[in-house]
């Protein structure tokens, strides 16, 4: 092997090792961003820091949401009382975002992933979907419950709440907000009041 080829090979190995090390460091940093659950004081500081950011968020082109074929009904099985409740699709629901129970499984997965990432205990209160537990007074949406310093913040889960919380805990400047069938990038700081309501017990 010529000296020139050997030299190029060493450079390639060094560059690859550097990239690999950087990727590992980035992965480690991502993994250890929240070694313990943030306290109320830390969340207040994060909100203050977000409000103080003077970053110009560039608007992105809207991305259309695929229109899904929704079922005529969804059967909800209650883990508390073990009864089933059949939910009929509202005539106005033409996509999943207009019928929360149709994407309940996805919401559960998102909440579980977010809770694991930021170490905060959070879960969905789905009692409102059970006809037996509510004695027929069904709710359209689940509640999202966040435990902070052993206190509960309970709120009805709105369409963009999980996107907003995920962007907040990941330190992003913008968030993709769903507007009808489109997603539009907006400054995260616009949602500080909603973040505070979702996370800070009243």
Image (cartoon, rainbow, N blue to C red):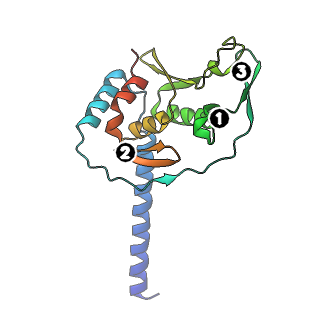
Disc 1 crowd rating (10 Å Cα; few below 14, some 14-19, many 20+) is few
Q: Residue tagged by mark 3?
A: 78
Instruction: Report x, y in % for residue 139.
Output: 61, 21
Q: Residue at x 58, y 36 (%)?
A: 98
Element at badge 3?
loop
CA distance for labels 1 and 2 = 26 Å
Instruction: Report x, y in % for residue 114.
Output: 50, 35
Q: Of residues 161 and 44, which is closer to you in this image?
A: 161
Q: Of residues 13 and 117, which is closer to you in this image?
A: 117
Q: Which residue is at the far front? A: 91
Q: Earlier in the sequence, mark 1 or mark 2?
A: 1
Q: Is residue 9 above or below residue 49?
A: below
Instruction: Report x, y in % for residue 120.
Output: 47, 27
Quarter of the image for residue 169 reads top left
Q: Residue at x 77, y 18 (%)?
A: 83
* Residue 29 falls left or right of residue 70: left
- Of tags 3 and 2, the one toward the viewer is 2
Q: Residue tagged by mark 2?
A: 186
Quarter of the image for residue 104 reads top right
Report whether residue 138 is seen: yes
Q: Earlier in the sequence, mark 1 or mark 3?
A: 3
Q: Earlier in the sequence, mark 3 or mark 2?
A: 3
CA distance for labels 1 and 3 = 13 Å
Q: Residue tagged by mark 1?
A: 105
């Amino acid at each position: 092997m010529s000296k020139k080829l050997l030299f190029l090979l060493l450079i390639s190995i060094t560059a690859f090792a550097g990239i690999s090390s950087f990727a590992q460091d980035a992965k480690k940093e991502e993994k250890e961003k929240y070694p313990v659950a943030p306290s109320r004081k830390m969340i207040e500081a994060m909100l203050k820091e977000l409000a103080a950011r003077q970053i110009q968020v560039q608007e992105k082109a809207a991305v259309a949401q695929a229109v899904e074929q929704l079922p005529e009904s969804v059967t909800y099985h209650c883990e508390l009382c073990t009864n089933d409740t059949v939910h009929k699709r509202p005539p106005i629901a033409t996509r999943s975002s207009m019928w929360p129970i149709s994407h309940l499984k996805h919401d559960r997965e998102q909440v579980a992933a977010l809770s694991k990432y930021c170490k905060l205990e959070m879960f969905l209160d789905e009692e409102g979907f059970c006809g037996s537990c509510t004695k027929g007074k069904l709710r359209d949406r689940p509640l999202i419950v966040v435990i902070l310093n052993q206190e509960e913040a309970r709120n009805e889960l709105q369409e963009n709440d999980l996107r907003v919380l995920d962007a907040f805990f990941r330190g992003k400047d913008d968030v993709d907000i769903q507007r009808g069938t489109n997603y539009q990038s907006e400054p995260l700081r616009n949602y500080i009041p909603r973040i505070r309501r979702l996370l800070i017990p009243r």
